Amino acid sequence: MASPPACCLWKETMIDPTIVLITGERQVGKTTACLRAVTLMRQAGLEVSGLVTTRTGCHALSVRELHTGAVYPLTLPFEDPTDRTLMNFRMDPEAMARSGTSLARAFPTDVVVIDELGPLEFRRGEGWVEAFDYLRRGRYHLGVLVVRPELLVAGVRRLARDVYTVVHVTSGNRDRVPVMITEMAKAAVARTGTGEELEL
């Protein structure tokens, strides 16, 4: 009889999940690396949930809900005066609310990916700010968070963790990062899922 998938072996008494902070300069390929890692982790039999933002224009972003497959615009037209400007983007309040609600349903999971937590969350206390509470509660094995370099210290403080890993994505290592994340995810599930090695 086949073993149940790792997501079915959840235990509320797990030790603290592993947190990986992905950082790097703008347009270096952080989102691309995350999406490739999602593919590799799913091929390894892991459940992956969360939100990934993709730049679709100079002033436009879309969001993909990894756990539902839904994709929709996250921003309003830049010239629209009804919303505040944030780093050349006008966030759509309805889309932000929709994705925030979806994030609440992303747990429990093996891996949660959030791309990205930025000025909206750290400086304004808006956007996907609830993500910090979800991450503190656990119910996942590995958390992969994309954070801009200038917000990295704020991210570490907000997570209030003793142990975390920072991965700086560069043009030289971005092709290796997805494999690295996948190996970390497999190790985290094996370490925290059942107390035994899982066949992934």
Image (spheres, rainbow, N blue to C red):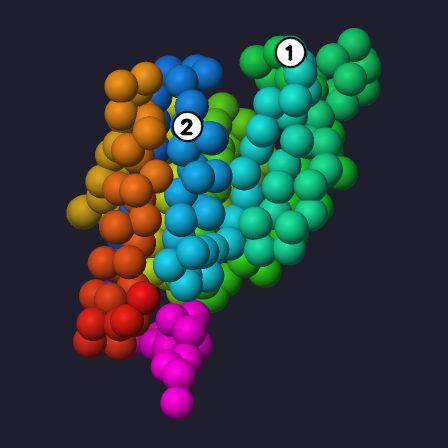
Does residue 12 sit above or below 154 in this rendering? below
Name the quadrant of the C terminus: bottom left
Quote the CA–CA distance across marks 2 and 1: 17 Å
Query: Which numbered circle lies on residue 58?
Result: 1
Q: Is residue 23 left or right of residue 109?
A: left
Q: Mark 1: few, some, or many residues within 10 Å (few <14, many ≥20)?
A: few
Name the quadrant of the N terminus: bottom left
Q: Is residue 195 left or right of residue 125?
A: left
Q: Is residue 185 left or right of residue 111?
A: left
Local SS, label 2: helix
Q: Which residues are magenta?
A: 1-15
- The residue under the point 44% across, 52% down is 112
Image coordinates of residue 187 in percent, x first then y, are 23, 58
- The residue under the point 37% across, 81% down is 3
- The residue under the point 44% across, 39% down is 36
Q: Three-letter amino acid code at disc 1?
A: Cys
Please say whether residue 20 is visible from this viewpoint. Answer: no
Would you say the magenta stretch is mainly helix, strand or loop?
loop
Residue 109 within the magenta-colored segment of the rendering: no
Q: Quadrant of residue 190?
A: bottom left
Does residue 78 sit above or below 114 in this rendering? above
Q: Is residue 154 left or right of residue 57?
A: left
Residue 6 within the magenta-colored segment of the rendering: yes
Local SS, label 1: loop
- Residue bearing the label numbered 2: 30
Q: Mark 2: few, some, or many residues within 10 Å (few <14, many ≥20)?
A: many
Total marks drawn? Answer: 2
